[in-house]
Amino acid sequence: MPSKKIAAFTPYFTEEQAGQVRAAFLAAGALEGDASVSDFIVRATMREVKRLQRKHHHGRAWDPAPAGALRRGQRTMDEIRQRDTKDN
């Protein structure tokens, strides 16, 4: 069976978030079957994708979005402040 092509994404974490990601992976990644922090992030992300599909798309997968369809780069400082205000 041919291998699937890997698409690259670069998530941006704050230092605090990155520290927690690393700590969670080191503490439980192997126990959960993750061979790398990338495996850990992919598994967590796909779990969230499935949750959003159930909530917003009747449990169905969306049509794939093509490469280049997403905004590139980090959030602006104003966007970070708005997100942090909304999350609290």
Image: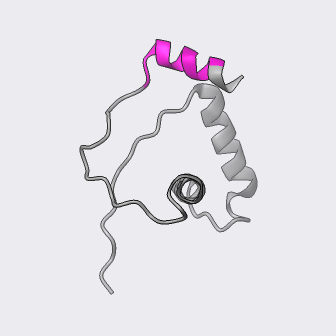
What is the magenta segment's predominant secondary structure?
A: helix
Which residue is drawn at the image coordinates 59% and 54% (left, top)?
Answer: 55
Q: Quadrant of the N terminus?
A: bottom left
Extent of the magenta region = 75-85
Which residue is drawn at the image coordinates 41% and 41% (left, top)?
Answer: 10
Residue 81 part of the magenta-drawn span: yes
Which residue is drawn at the image coordinates 26% and 53% (left, top)?
Answer: 66
Q: Residue 73 occupies which quadrant of the picture?
A: top left
Residue 37 falls left or right of residue 12: right
Q: Nearer the viewer, residue 10 or 19?
A: 10
Q: Nearer the viewer, residue 47 or 51?
A: 51
Percent of width and height locating residue 11? 46, 39
Residue 6 falls left or right of residue 20: left
| Residue at the outermost front position | 58
Instruction: Tally the numbered discs.
Output: 0
Percent of width and height locating residue 51? 60, 56
Above or below, 21 against 63 in this view is above
Q: Residue 44 occupies which quadrant of the picture?
A: bottom right
Q: Quadrant of the C terminus?
A: top right
Percent of width and height locating residue 15? 60, 27
Above or below, 13 against 42 in this view is above
Percent of width and height locating residue 20? 69, 38
Residue 66 falls left or right of residue 84: left
Residue 10 part of the magenta-drawn span: no
Above or below, 62 against 76 in this view is below
Which residue is drawn at the image coordinates 67% and 26% (left, top)?
Answer: 87
Q: Nearer the viewer, residue 58 or 5?
A: 58
